[in-house]
Image (spheres, helix red, strand yellow):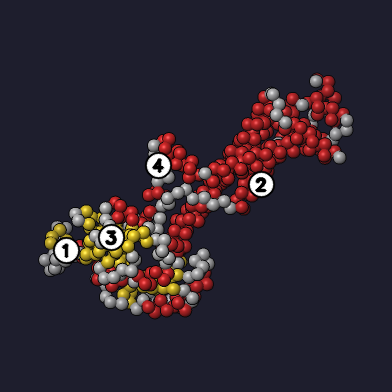
Amino acid sequence: MLKRAEFFLALRYLKPERSAVGVITVISIIGVSLGVAVLMIVLAVMTGFTDLMKEKIIDTQAHVQVRSTVYGAFRSPYKYVDMIEKLGGRAFPVIAAPALMQFQRRLEPSIFVMGADSEDLSKSVDLKDVVKSGEFNLGRNEIAISTTMAARWMIGVGDKILLHSPRKLTNMVKISDSGKVELNENNPVYLPMEFTVKALYSFNKSDFDRSVVFVPLDDAAKLFELRAGYATAVFGYFKDPYNLDSELAALNRELKGTSMRAMSWEETNSALLGVLAVEKRMMFFLLIFIVLVAAFSITNTLITSVYKKTKEIGILKALGATDGACMRIFVYQGMFVGIIGTICGTLLGYLVLYFRNDILEFGSRITGQDLFPKEFYFFDGLPAKIITSDVVLICVAAIILCTLGAVIPALRAAKLDPAKALRYE
């Protein structure tokens, strides 16, 4: 019965009053709400960013890549294709290397050429939503470029572009022992390869769309002066790209003793994924201090409340209330503030996340600046994914901190002498 009275009194003391204590209580609840909302929003955005980054990596990279650890190119790539297909995957050889792209008199140095047969590529990558114009079935001297490149260079399907091999360019000159640069007369003058734009694509990943072009495998071999039957990598695709441990282990057992090695997309992008994971943990660690500050404001509120209700505490003790009962009243009050603030903060977090892109667009219009430039963040919109375990962790941490913030004033209330409390009041 007494415990029920403690809950009742704790709830009674939470009712808004026209006094400084009531205002501070409301401010404390707002502080907890904002702290919970900010934590929830940041962790959801970080999770969404990481998950969408993984999806885009899987869309634009092979699940497994078999490469030589010694040489840039290797022969007989189809025996590694067979290894991957025996494990239930799909695979094809690839020639991938940097090149220079020329359209009329303009030159783009940071182009990455991906040479692969269109039929093999279409079996492993879903190209339906990727192709924006033209057809991806590339024939001899045909090329697929991104819509980003097309817009920047004002290129359309059917236009002609040139690709320069860096190796051929460097062979045009020679450097003498004295450091003088001269024309290499022993090397014949070469012509760049001409390609017709057959398709425009977009993976909605700006760093990939900005730099990668696709050409047939044989054309890539000719461009980079590789022998017939050579490749720079074998790309493998499996049903579950998030669980490749067994397939990767089996491949590397087959490759043991050779110069070849199989790597998953997670290994290839381990630095980026590691940074994202560390950033999420650091964000939680730093932003939990917002809730901690709100907990200190609860401490301040309840200390003021204890002094204001000294007479009531004295009466309760005179009627037989124990020190523990008086202490629990104020601990419950801090817990209730934490619960109310957590509920409001969670609702606010969901609301902001739901309208996040509208808020960004409004902010961009007000400031006149793009608050989420896709050329830096690789995505067209702000990603977010709410993880239930993250929300539970935030809510539990907020309620615990707010409850602990009430301990000091609760101890003060428990130590009050009823005779002195009633005498001075």
Amino acid residing under circle 4: Asp
Mark 4 highlights which residue?
Answer: 370
Helix, strand or loop for disc 4: loop
Query: Is residue 263 something that shows in the picture?
Result: no
Residue at the image point whose x is 24% and y is 71% from the top: 222
Amino acid residing under circle 1: Met
Q: Is residue 28 above or below residue 47?
A: above
Which of the numbered marks, if any, corresponds to residue 172? 1
What is the residue that sits farthest to the right in this orientation?
319
Amino acid residing under circle 3: Val
Mark 2 highlights which residue?
Answer: 396
Compute the Cα span from label 2 to label 1: 68 Å
Helix, strand or loop for disc 3: loop
Instruction: Indicate the quadrant where residue 81 lies.
Output: bottom left
Q: Nearer the viewer, residue 228 or 331?
A: 228
Which of the numbered marks, if any, corresponds to residue 157? 3
Compute the Cα span from label 4 to label 2: 36 Å
Dot 1 surroundings within 10 Å: few (below 14), some, or many (20 or more)? some
Q: Earlier in the sequence, mark 2 or mark 1?
A: 1
In the rendering, at what x and y percent does residue 59 appear? 43, 62
Compute the Cα span from label 3 to label 1: 32 Å
Q: Is residue 85 above or below residue 354?
A: below
Q: Are marks 4 and 3 in contact (CB under 8 Å)?
A: no
Q: Earlier in the sequence, mark 4 or mark 1?
A: 1
Q: Nearer the viewer, mark 4 or mark 1?
A: 4
Q: Are marks 2 and 1 in contact (CB under 8 Å)?
A: no
Q: Nearer the viewer, mark 4 or mark 2?
A: 4
In the rendering, at what x and y percent does residue 276 appear? 48, 53
Dot 3 surroundings within 10 Å: few (below 14), some, or many (20 or more)? some
Q: Earlier in the sequence, mark 3 or mark 1?
A: 3
Q: Is residue 372 above or below residue 110?
A: above
Q: Are marks 3 and 2 in contact (CB under 8 Å)?
A: no
